[in-house]
Image (tube, rainbow, N blue to C red):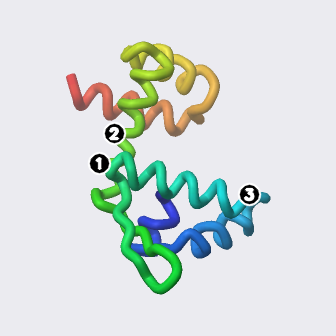
Amino acid sequence: MKLVWARGQASVRDVYEALLEERRIAYTTVMTMLNVLEKKGHLKKKAAGRSFVYRPTRPQRQVIGAMVREFVERVFGGSAEPLLVHLVEERLSPQELDALAKRIRGKK
C-alpha cells in the first residue's frame, strides 16, 4: 500500500521491483497481496494493456485505521490494550513515548 500511495498508482511489476530493492519476494506474492487489497476495497484496478494498474481507493490514514482495527479484532479479540502494552514496553523510543503521552493527555 505504501508504494501505491507514494506513486499514486502502480502495476504489480512496479511494486515487485520496488520491493526487490529491499528483500527477495516472489512476483506472485506481490500479485496476490495486491488482489487481496483490492478485494478488501483498499485498491482499485484498471486494465492497462496486458496488466493491471492499481490505485488507492481511500486516503492512507483511513486505510491504516481500518487495517489496525481488523488486526486488533483478529489478534487481540478487539482489545487494543495488549497491543499498546507491547508497543510501550518493546518498540517505542523515549521520544516516541513522550509524544504519545502528550497525545493521550490531549485526548482526556
Q: Give neighbour class at mark 1: few <14, some 14-19, many 20+ (Cα, 10 Å).
A: few
Secondary structure type for disc 1: helix
81 is higher (above) or lower (below) than 68: above
Identify the residue under disc 3. Answer: 25
Read off the residue under disc 2.
66
**Residue 56's spot in the image, x, y percent?**
35, 63
Label 3 crowd (10 A; few <14 / some 14-19 / many >=20) = few
Measured Cα–Cα span from mark 1 to mark 3: 27 Å
Query: Which quadrant of the view contains residue 26?
Result: bottom right
Q: Nearer the viewer, residue 56 or 41?
A: 41
Q: Is residue 77 left or right of residue 106?
A: right
Seen as rendered, the residue at the extreme left is: 108
Disc 3 marks which amino acid?
Ile
Q: Single out the mark in the foreground, 3 or 2.
A: 3
- Residue 49, given in percent of the width and then of the height, sits at 47, 86
Counting residues from the start of the chain, the first of labels 3 and 2 encountered is: 3
Residue 73 rendering spot, x and y as whole percentages: 40, 21
- In the image shown, does 71 or 50 lie closer to the viewer? 50
Pointer 2 with pointer 1, Cβ within 8 A: yes
Q: Amino acid at mark 2?
A: Ala
SS for callout 2: helix
Mark 1 lies on residue: 62
Where 77 sits versus 19, above or below? above
Q: Which mark is residue 100?
A: none
